[in-house]
Structure formats: C-alpha cells, structure tokens
Amino acid sequence: MIDAINNRISVRTYQKKPLTAKDEKDVKELLLKLKELKGPFKNQVRLFFYDSPYVGDEVNIQIGTYGFIKNPPAFVAGCVKNTFESIVDYGYVFEKVILEITKLGLGTVWLGGTFNRDAFDYLLAEGEIVPAITPVGYPAEKKSIREKLIRKSAKGDSRKPFNEMFFENDLKTPLSDSNIAAKYLELVRVGPSASNKQPWRAVVKGNKVHFYLEKTKGYAESLSFDIQALDLGIAICHFESGLITDKKSYAIGVDQDHPIFDSLKYIISFDCIKNVKLG
C-alpha cells in the first residue's frame, strides 16, 4: 500500500477506450471486498461502479464533471450519512478504494466539488450524500492543457513543509524527523487533499498521535458538507497504512485527554500500544 500512496497521481485525462473486461471485473471485485469496510468512526459506506458517464438504468442522468475530466470510461462513487464523522469515514474508505485501484495500474482522481452530484439523488436514503467520486481508466500519455492549468492552480506537485503540520506536545515544537512517527506522518504529508489545502495537523505526545483539522476559512462553503473532513479521512488512512505495513500494534479512537488548541478541531488519536514508542 505504501507504494500506491507514493505512486498515485491525480489523473484528469484518460485514453479514449473502455476498461477491459478483466479490469472492470477486478474493480467490481475490489468494491465487493471492501463493502463491509468502515472508517474510524464506524460508519458504513455504500460503493457503486458505473461503466458509462450515466447513472441508473431508468433515470439515465449524466454524471458530468464540468469539463474537468476528459474521456472517463468509468466511475466509482459512494454514499454515506451527512455528518462530519461520516464524511471522515468516507474519506478513509474511499482512499482505500483509490489506492487499491492504483495497485491495479488504473488512473483515478478525487472529485469532491466538480461533478453533477444531483445525478446520484436516486440512490440516497434520507440524510445521505455522495461526498466524492472518482473516474477510473487508463491515463493518457499527455495531459490536456486544462489539466495542466488545474494542476498548476491547485499546486498539485507541491506540499507544505513537514514542520508546518506535525508537532510534538504543542504547536510550538515541530516534530523531529528522528521521531518514529515521522515516517508515517510523511505518508500523510504526500496525500491528496481538496485544492491541495492540506488541512491536517498532528501532535505527537508520548505514545499517542493526535489528529486535528485546521479549517481553511471561507473554503467551499457553498457545499452542503465539510469537504475537508474527507481530507482527514485520507490522512488517517495513510498513517494507518504505514503502521500496518510495518506490522505495528495500535489502537485508534477518540482520546478524551487529547491536547486542546483553539485554532484546531480535534478529530481522533492513534495509541501505539505495544512495540512502538512514539517519542
């Protein structure tokens, strides 16, 4: 999974061809395998596959990506309850999906605000939402001019410095790269986020790693959900993937004794309880 985290890129321009029967079968089997997966707050995500730019045999509504995606042969989408914790869980589960699709050699990109969300209304129970989708296909050899402009405007090839996001004990002490947690937090740093805002923050205290959201003021307020909750789900997924790869023991949950900071919204904590000392 670590290779998928490091190798995944956002693909907005695809080759003009459908998925092969094998690749479509592999993606569908993947979604079936992950259908019982829940996020850190234990919310269920329902996942769907579409092999055309339309949804529903009866409604036949175009998914539509407002020109941001070119030649998408298929899509994966999902729905979940519209609560902050559920959206975090969606980010966690959907990033697992995207990383597994990456391992299959297929291209993807997170779409949170640039698709026709109304196309999925027929799927939803009361209180549910489709927070994000991804196209699935074969990356084109050359990016479109629009894709290059989007990537440049979102600064898709840049990330904030490590010492601006990850700390020890408080927000004044940047986490040393010699701390064992740094290896796993680097996997968080390289992760995707909406408009590359990178709103995740983490504070390491003893054996615990506490995750927070530094909310971007005024960002995406027109949406009916907090899109940056997705980013925290992605961050949690990446951090946990590192621990799992190295076979480290851990527990994840809400820590009532977490450090409190006025500028940050607390999300969840990792307690590395056996063979890891994060300090």
Image (tube, rainbow, N blue to C red):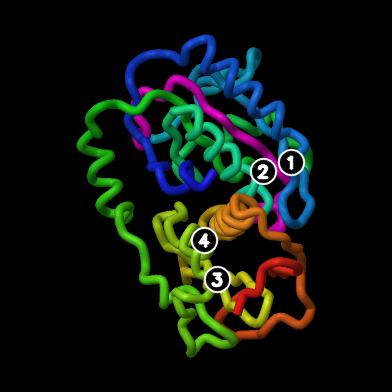
State left or right for residue 145 relative to residue 108.
left
| Image disc number at residue 221 | 4
Instruction: Depth check: give the residue in front, 212 or 210.
Output: 210
Instruction: Depth check: give the residue in front, 125 or 11.
Output: 11
| Disc nearer the start of the sequence (1/3) | 1
| Image disc number at residue 180 | 3
CA–CA distance between discs 3 and 4?
A: 37 Å
- Residue depth check, mark 1 versus mark 3: number of the one nearer the observer: 3
State left or right for residue 92 relative to residue 15.
right
| Image disc number at residue 129 | 2
Which residue position is annotated with label 1?
37
For the residue marked with disc 4, what is the amino acid?
Answer: Glu
Q: Does dot 1 land on a helix, a strand or a loop? A: loop
| Disc nearer the start of the sequence (4/2) | 2
- Circle 2/circle 3 CB separation < 8 Å: no
Residue at position x 25%, y 27% from top? 141
CA–CA distance between discs 2 and 3?
A: 38 Å
CA–CA distance between discs 1 and 3?
A: 28 Å
Does the magenta segment cover residue 82?
yes
Q: Is residue 154 visible?
A: yes
- Circle 3/circle 4 CB separation < 8 Å: no
Residue at position x 75%, y 69% from top? 273
Q: Does dot 3 land on a helix, a strand or a loop? A: helix
Residues drawn in magenta? 67-88
Q: Does dot 4 land on a helix, a strand or a loop? A: loop
Q: Does dot 2 land on a helix, a strand or a loop? A: strand
State left or right for residue 71 relative to residue 187.
left
For the residue marked with disc 2, what is the amino acid?
Answer: Ile
